[in-house]
């Protein structure tokens, strides 16, 4: 019997728009613009549409909003109402979106 060595599973990496660091996809929030042009946080990372990734840190989200990087990444204008919803719905850095 020929036993081939097990290959490690490839871990998907994504770039955080705030700190510009490559991190595991599971460590980041996905903010998505749906085909209906609705911007929301995609906690399950499965919604269809154009996505942008941000760290699980409110500082990164604030930087993304301040530098207008989110609007550029999603190729849409982000209204003040959507920014307030995103900030209110964002999980505090102490909490985690990763289930144990």
Image (cartoon, helix red, strand yellow):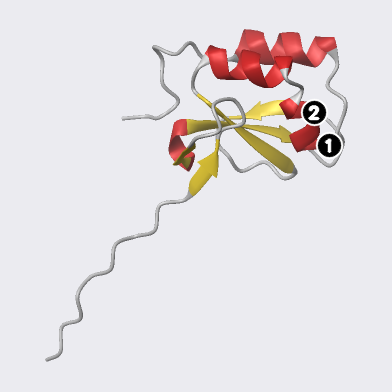
Which residue is painted at 50% across and 35% down in the image? 21
Residue shown at 73% from the left, 27% from the top: 70
- The vertical placement of 95 against 37, above or below, is above
- At label 1, counting other C-alpha atoms closer than 10 Å, the crowd grade (few under 14, some 14-19, many 20 or more) is few
Res 75 quadrant in image: top right
Determine whether label 2 and label 1 are within 8 Å by CB. yes
**Would you identify the image quadrant in which residue 97 lies?**
top left
Which residue is disc 2 drawn over?
A: 71
Of the 4 image quadrants, the one containing the N terminus is bottom left
Q: Position of residue 90 (x, y in %)?
A: 58, 15
Can you tell which quarter of the image residue 84 is in?
A: top right
Mark linked to residue 64:
none
**Is 84 rendered above or below residue 64?**
above
Give the x, y percent position of residue 80.
83, 10
Residue 73 lies, in percent from the top left, at: 75, 36
Nearer-the-camera pick, 28 or 96: 28
> What residue is pinned by disc 1?
75
Q: Is residue 18 left or right of residue 82?
A: left
The extreme left residue here reads 1
Q: Is residue 80 visible?
A: yes
Front-most of 32 and 13?
A: 13
Nearest the eye: 63 or 43:
63
Q: How many marks?
A: 2
Label 2: few (<14), some or many (≥20) within 10 Å? some
The residue positioned 39% from the left and 58% from the top of the image is 10
């Amino acid at each position: 019997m020929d036993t081939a060595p097990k290959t490690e599973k490839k871990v998907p990496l994504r770039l955080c728009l705030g700190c510009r660091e490559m991190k595991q996809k599971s460590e980041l929030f996905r903010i998505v613009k749906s085909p209906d042009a609705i911007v929301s946080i995609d906690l399950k990372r499965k919604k269809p549409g154009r996505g942008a990734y941000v760290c699980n840190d409110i500082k990164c989200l604030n930087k993304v909003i301040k530098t207008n990087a989110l609007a550029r990444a999603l190729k849409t204008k982000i209204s003040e109402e959507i920014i307030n919803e995103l900030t209110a719905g964002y999980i505090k850095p102490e909490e985690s979106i990763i289930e144990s």
